[in-house]
């Protein structure tokens, strides 16, 4: 599910950049945050603790 979410976010980002439609980008970003949110926060905290 995470790979699908990342692929969807990448595709809709390109689509939104070409067409100017932000609705699809927002929906994909919400799905990405729902499926990968904890992983992103954990990695970000590890990076900040190293510095």
Image: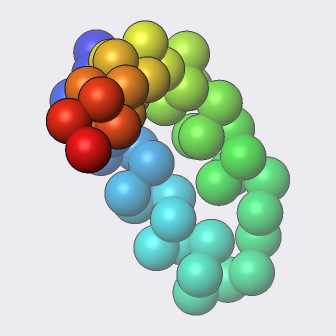
- Quarter the C terminus occupies: top left
Residue sitting at x 30%, y 29%: 49
Question: Horizontal and vertical percent for residue 10?
Answer: 37, 57
Looking at the rendered structure, the number of numbered marks drawn on it comes to 0
Residue nearest the observer in this picture, 23 or 33 = 33
In the image, residue 50 sits, relative to residue 8, either above or below, namely above
Question: Horizontal and vertical percent for residue 31?
Answer: 56, 26
Name the quadrant containing residue 22.
bottom right
Residue nearest the observer in this picture, 45 or 13 = 45
Residue sitting at x 51%, y 65%: 13
Residue furthest to the bottom = 18
In the image, residue 1 sits, relative to residue 23, either above or below, namely above
Residue nearest the observer in this picture, 41 or 21 = 41
- Quarter the N terminus occupies: top left
Residue sitting at x 20%, y 36%: 50
Residue sitting at x 55%, y 26%: 33
Name the quadrant containing residue 3.
top left
Name the quadrant containing residue 44.
top left
Residue furthest to the front = 51
Q: Please say whether residue 34 is visible from this viewpoint.
A: yes
Colour convention: rainbow
In the image, residue 8 sits, relative to residue 14, either above or below, namely above
Question: Horizontal and vertical percent for residue 14?
Answer: 46, 73
Q: Please say whether residue 43 is visible from this viewpoint.
A: no
In the image, residue 12 sits, relative to residue 8, either above or below, namely below
Question: Horizontal and vertical percent for residue 15?
Answer: 53, 71
């Amino acid at each position: 599910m995470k790979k699908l979410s990342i692929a969807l976010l990448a595709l809709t980002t390109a689509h939104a950049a070409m067409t100017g439609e932000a609705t699809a980008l927002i929906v994909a970003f919400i799905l990405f945050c729902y499926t990968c949110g904890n992983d992103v926060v954990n990695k970000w905290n590890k990076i900040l603790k190293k510095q």
